[in-house]
Image (cartoon, rainbow, N blue to C red):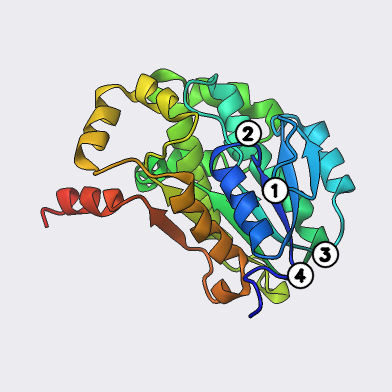
């Protein structure tokens, strides 16, 4: 039987730990050639590693130049937690992710799949449309000013929440952008996941995070999330476009039930 990603070349950012590491492992096990991208040097489950800081536009351009033509999938998993400085969070989680993706489009194969790792933190995107629209043309040099003038600063982990809200919207907006070439974009939104940065969320959100943990039976694991990313990278998901799939143990449904008194 043919493997899920047999013959595919897949780029996985954030491949050195957490969901990125598990995604790289599953892609490799599924028959793919895995091109890993991370700040940390790793040789686990990757055929080639590109050491890149995704907050740096020069390194992103160099990465795109170095990657081969004919890439079948891009898993945008790399991200910074809310304990990181707001400017860095926006540069990596949003501006750098978008820059890498748009610059890589010419090198993607027809029928390629782009999967963005969003978050349950992006659940409230509809309440922040004005700021999200203001961020659509955001460049690296503009991030500091944007943080000062919009609700995207350090307080309460707001920079992280905003980065994921804007990422969800960007995914929705690009449902058909490259449809003529069969290139699709989707997002996966995990809830709390037991990775090395889970403690950063608990530290930043305090009682809010503790309440989430009380409601849930357990936090997720990378093994809960990565199979959904791998599926969206595969040809089996070809008719899914612009979707944001919650993989959160039911937490988003819980929120919706509370909001709508269901």
Badge 4 or badge 3: first in the primary sequence: 4
Q: Nearer the viewer, mark 1 or mark 4?
A: 1
Secondary structure type for disc 1: loop
| Residue corresponding to mark 4 | 7
Q: Looking at the picture, does residue 209 appear above or below residue 176?
A: above
Query: What distance separates the C-alpha of mark 1 from that of mark 4?
Result: 16 Å
Query: What distance separates the C-alpha of mark 3 from that of mark 1?
Result: 20 Å
Please identify the quarter of the rendering in which residue 253 is found: bottom left
Badge 3 or badge 1: first in the primary sequence: 1
Mark 1 touching mark 4, by CB under 8 A?
no
Relative to the observer, which residue lies in front, 147 or 107? Answer: 107
| Residue corresponding to mark 3 | 70
| Residue corresponding to mark 2 | 92
Secondary structure type for disc 3: loop
Query: What distance separates the C-alpha of mark 4 from that of mark 3?
Result: 11 Å
**Residue at 24% from the left image edge and 43% from the top image edge:** 216
Badge 2 or badge 1: first in the primary sequence: 1
Q: Looking at the picture, does residue 100 appear above or below residue 177?
A: above
| Residue corresponding to mark 1 | 45
Q: Quadrant where the N terminus lies?
A: bottom right
């Amino acid at each position: 039987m043919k493997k899920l990603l047999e013959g595919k070349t897949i780029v996985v950012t954030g491949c050195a730990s957490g969901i990125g590491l598990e995604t790289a492992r599953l892609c490799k096990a599924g028959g793919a050639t895995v091109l890993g991208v991370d700040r940390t040097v790793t040789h686990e489950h990757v055929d080639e590693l590109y050491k890149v800081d995704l907050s740096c536009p020069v390194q992103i351009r160099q990465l795109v130049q170095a990657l081969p033509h004919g890439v079948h999938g891009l898993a945008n998993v790399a991200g910074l937690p809310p304990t990181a400085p707001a400017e860095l969070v926006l540069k990596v989680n949003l501006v750098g992710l978008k820059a890498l993706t748009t610059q890589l489009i010419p090198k993607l194969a027809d029928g390629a799949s782009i999967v963005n790792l969003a978050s349950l933190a992006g659940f409230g995107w509809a309440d922040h449309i004005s700021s999200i629209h203001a961020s659509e043309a955001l460049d690296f040099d503009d991030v500091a000013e944007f943080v000062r003038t919009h609700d995207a600063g350090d307080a309460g982990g707001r920079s992280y929440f905003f980065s994921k809200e804007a990422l969800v919207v960007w995914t929705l907006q690009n449902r058909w952008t490259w449809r003529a070439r069969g290139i699709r974009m989707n997002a996966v939104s995990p809830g709390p996941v037991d990775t090395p940065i889970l403690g950063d969320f608990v530290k930043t959100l305090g009682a809010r995070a503790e309440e989430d943990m009380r409601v849930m039976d357990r936090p997720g694991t990378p093994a809960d999330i990565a199979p959904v990313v791998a599926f969206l990278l595969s040809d089996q998901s070809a008719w899914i476009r612009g979707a944001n799939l919650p993989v959160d143990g039911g937490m988003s449904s819980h929120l919706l039930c509370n909001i709508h008194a269901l």
